[in-house]
Image: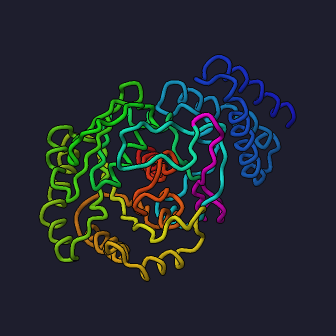
Amino acid sequence: QSVGRWGIVLYCTIVASLWLPRGFKQLPACAIFSLRTMAALRVGFKSVKSRLVWRLAPATATAITLILTFYLRFGSIRDIGDIARAKLCPIETIKLGHWVSATYDHPPYTPMRGEVQQRVCENFDPQSTFHTWEWEPEAAHGPGGCHFSGFEESSYCRIMHNKTLAILGDSISFDHYLALSHLLGVPRALPRAMKKTALLTSWVCQNSSLLIGKRDFHLNSVGQIIEEFSPDVLVLNRGAHYVPDHELLQHMNEKVFPVLHEWQQKCMDYRKRCFFIWRTTVPGHPNCTMYTQPSDSLDEMETLIRLHPTYNWDKFSAQNELVLDALNKRNLEYEVMDAYFLNILRPDMHNGNDCLHTCLPEDNTYSALLNHILQIKYHD
């Protein structure tokens, strides 16, 4: 048994130094994976009376790791840690959880001036430590556990290599485009004079992936974006511009859903993997300047919004359900980025502003959710 363990460590050392992209940084994950595999095999082989077969567990674990290494080297996976880590949390379980404090040596990026929709977070200093909050799903601590990936540039770029992602919707969706482009290393500031409906594109991931952002409050340009850019991933939202329920559903059923269905059919015809992600709408928070940290009570936040029905924010929850119900009745493949349950707990993230928009570089929630969904869908 000891020989088997040391043999695995020696093997992983050789592999890490010669093959794997990040060299010796892969050694711990490689060893952990192999040892876990050996332990699992020993449990399985205990039912076999032959001690010779039972003793084959170390060699079998090494062989499995060898096969995996070839796949790491020549296949689409680039990090053995992706396998050694716990499984990714199912998409539908992410929305239940809480915010936990986190501190980093520096912020993820420095916002550029000219981004009029979002403000720089109060007391932001690009040279100092960065104090923030990160989402932790309850499922991570449930039976079996799971992993919420958050945002990882390397993961996003690996998945979206030679692909196009478009984010369309209201100004909040455009804020998502801004934050994501910064996380992917785009430092460009927006023009000071820019039409609200302007279309912006950014080549990211060393020019291997195209990111598109457009303010389109009623999603009237979805067909145009599909025709011009043929996106692989569409992230859509009707946004915080309230209209009555019947008007919302009529427009979605008659204008938006048919275009999406045609797009998905074309993707199937060309054997292209296309994903449609619908983001739920998060209301603003009345009296947001009173808050300095996240809330841990959904009921408290919904009561606050219900008692101060600013800009019809109190109706957003019900309209989220209306759209999701309408989606369920259509022949569309989609995933839900259920941001409502996460950001409704962040009354502290507005930095004054209008108590609806959030501040940079604090709000990267949508990018974290997006990256997690993409990992699950493209590696399903």
**Residue 317 appears at what percent x and percent y?**
38, 74
Q: By what rule are the colours in the image chosen?
A: rainbow
Say which residue appears at 54% left-offset and 25% top-offset. Answer: 73
> Could you tell me residue 74's position as x and y percent?
49, 25
Magenta residues, as a range? 126-146
**43 left or right of 374 in image:** right
- Residue 261: x and y in percent read 18, 56
Foreground pick, 357 / 335: 357
> Quarter-wise, where is residue 22 in the image?
top right
Q: Is residue 265 left or right of residue 27?
A: left
Compared to residue 280, the image places residue 52 above or below, namely above
Give the side of residue 292 with respect to residue 207, left or right. Answer: right
Would you say residue 80 is visible in this rendering? yes
Q: Is residue 57 magenta?
A: no
Residue 273 is at least partly visible in this image? no
Looking at the picture, does residue 245 appear above or below residue 122? Answer: below
Residue 176 vs 330, above or below: the answer is: above
